Amino acid sequence: MERAEPIASYRDLLVWQRAIDLAEHCYAITKDFPREEVYGLTSQIRRCAVSVAANIAEGYGRDSAGAYIQLLKTSQGSLKELETHLIIARRTGIARGEVETAALARTDEIGRMLRALIRSVEKSAAH
């Protein structure tokens, strides 16, 4: 399958675009969290969600494939941390189940995309 446009920036990466969408979604759902969670789960969920996209962008800007891969793996770690916070929010009754389920579906998709991008960068670096 061919891409219509070449990738000229991290902003052209579909995984980065999806990560931005996820961060926006996380800001929206945490807006309704209880006020006492502003420094707890609200802050943690937002920080992790932003970190996923930010690490993709930072890695893209690095000079070596190794540094790029390391930051993509950091992004994966932030994604898993986000998933954990979302599950805790649901299990404690802070988030509604359907909200958390939708967010987790997005994290699954982004996780698959990150793994594919890592494999692609590794393959390119090997040649």
Image (tube, rainbow, N blue to C red):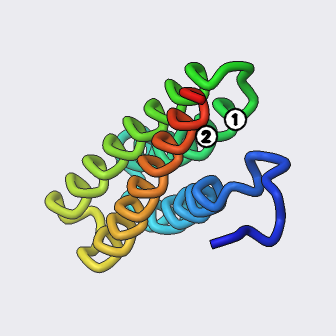
- The x, y position of residue 114, in whole percent, is 47, 48
Residue sitting farthest toward the bottom: 98
Location of the N terminus (image quadrant): bottom right
| Above-or-below relation of 82 to 77 | below
| Above-or-below relation of 49 to 99 | above
Residue shown at 54% from the left, 27% from the top: 126
Give the camera-side residue of 106 and 88: 106
- The x, y position of residue 12, in whole percent, is 76, 57
Question: What amino acid is found at the position of numbered circle 2 in the picture?
Answer: Ile
Question: What amino acid is found at the position of numbered circle 1 in the picture?
Answer: Tyr
- The x, y position of residue 38, in whole percent, is 44, 46
Write down the quadrant of residue 92 in the picture. bottom left
Residue shown at 56% from the left, 20% from the top: 66
Secondary structure beneath dot 2 equals helix
The answer to whether the residue labelled 1 contacts the one labelled 2, judged by CB atoms less than 8 Å apart, is yes
Query: What is the crowding at mark 1: few (fewer than 14 residues within 10 Å), some, or many (at least 20)?
Result: many
Residue wearing tag 1: 60
Residue wearing tag 2: 56
Residue shown at 33% from the left, 64% from the top: 104
